[in-house]
Image (cartoon, rainbow, N blue to C red):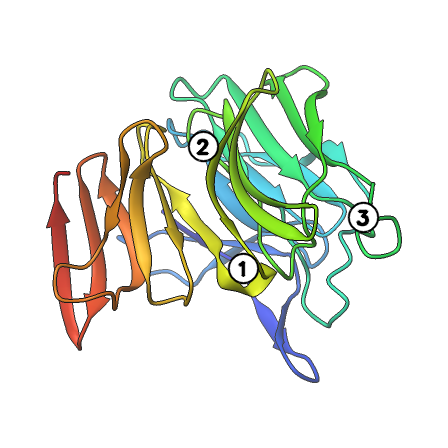
């Protein structure tokens, strides 16, 4: 089964309409609308495929892919202001057994209220979500907070005394500094390894990518210079990326 949503053309960006459609890849039939516009969202499947977390600018919904029906509201939050036409849609992380999910919600108006916190929310399926952590991060148009796959850590950027620090934070509030730069445009996060032990970040340009952890150190992703674009984890030991016009595979430390 293939699930997808539609978009429409805005003034500067393609804008999602937050619906949901399903296509049986073997049946040869037209797609079936599961949720009308405004009732769906950007989807993240649970590992068992039985639930779909649907994200909108102010809501996270849960859709039962087995039973169907309307999507249930899981979390309501204030729209994260991007100071532009694009919508910020929070990231959702499921636990491996599909029983629980996490999300990180950035501050609603981080320019208007610089001390407004970013929040981490958690809940087992069928229970109301609980805020389990909060911290002050830079606005989302500078850098996006990223949850580790196991939901226990966040990679984010914060301002400290006029400098900017890329930071790894655990749910208990302990933090480890990845690097500190003079300008917010000198670094940013890319993502976590599937085992939640390593990260990828860029600095000082988006093509200069590094991977590793504060405990083991960091290395260039690319082995043919600093140029590494569109870096993605395949599994806990392998990265794939573009470098010098080639699609390359990085294996191991």
Q: Is residue 124 visible?
A: yes
Q: Few, some or many C-alpha atoms within 10 Å of disc 2 (few <14, some 14-19, many ≥20)?
A: many
Quadrant where the C terminus is found in the figure: top left
Image location of residue 6, percent across then percent down: 56, 66
* Alpha carbon distance from label 1 to label 3: 25 Å
Instruction: Give the label on residue 148, or none.
Output: 2
* First in sequence: mark 3 vs mark 2: 3
Residue in the image at 44% along x and 31% along y: 46
User: Can you tell which mark lies on residue 5?
Assistant: 1
Front-lying residue, 101 or 71: 101
- Which residue has dot 3 on it? 108
Locate residue 23, reporting x and y percent.
Answer: 40, 55
Q: How far apart are the two marked residues, 2 and 1, measured between alpha carbons?
A: 26 Å
Tell me where residue 125 sits by quadrant: top right
Q: CA distance from mark 3 to mark 2?
A: 22 Å
Dots 1, 3 in contact, CB < 8 A? no
Looking at marks 2 and 1 on the same chain, the residue that comes earlier in the sequence is marked by 1
236 left or right, relative to 58: left
- Element at badge 3? loop
Q: Element type at marker 2?
A: loop
Residue 97 marker: none
Helix, strand or loop under label 1? loop
- Residue placed most toward the observer, 41 or 245: 245
Please identify the residue farthest to the right as the structure is shown: 112
In this picture, residue 21 sits left or right of residue 227: right
Q: Closer to the N terminus: mark 1 or mark 3?
A: 1
């Amino acid at each position: 089964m293939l699930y997808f949503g539609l978009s429409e053309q805005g003034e500067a960006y393609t804008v999602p309409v937050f619906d949901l459609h399903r296509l049986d890849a073997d049946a040869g039939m037209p797609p079936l609308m599961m949720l009308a516009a405004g009732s769906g969202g950007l989807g993240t499947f649970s590992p068992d495929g039985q639930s779909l977390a649907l994200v909108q600018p102010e809501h996270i919904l849960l859709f039962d892919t087995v039973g169907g029906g309307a999507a249930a509201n899981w979390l309501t939050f204030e729209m994260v202001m991007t100071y532009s036409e694009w919508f910020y849609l929070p990231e959702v992380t499921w636990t491996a057994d599909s029983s629980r999910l996490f999300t990180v919600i950035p501050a609603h108006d981080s320019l208007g209220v610089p001390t407004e916190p970013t929040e981490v929310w958690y809940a087992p399926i069928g229970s109301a979500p609980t805020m389990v952590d909060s911290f002050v991060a830079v606005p989302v148009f500078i850098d996006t907070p990223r949850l580790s796959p196991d939901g226990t850590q966040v990679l984010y950027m914060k301002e400290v005394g006029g400098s900017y620090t890329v930071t790894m934070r655990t749910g208990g509030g302990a933090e480890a500094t990845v690097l500190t730069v003079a300008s917010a445009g000198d670094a940013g996060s890319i993502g976590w390894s599937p085992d939640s032990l390593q990260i990828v970040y860029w600095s000082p340009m988006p093509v200069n990518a590094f991977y590793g952890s504060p405990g083991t150190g960091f290395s260039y992703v690319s082995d043919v210079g600093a140029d590494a674009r569109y870096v993605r984890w395949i599994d806990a030991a392998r990265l794939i990326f573009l470098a010098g016009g080639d699609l390359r595979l990085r294996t191991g430390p």
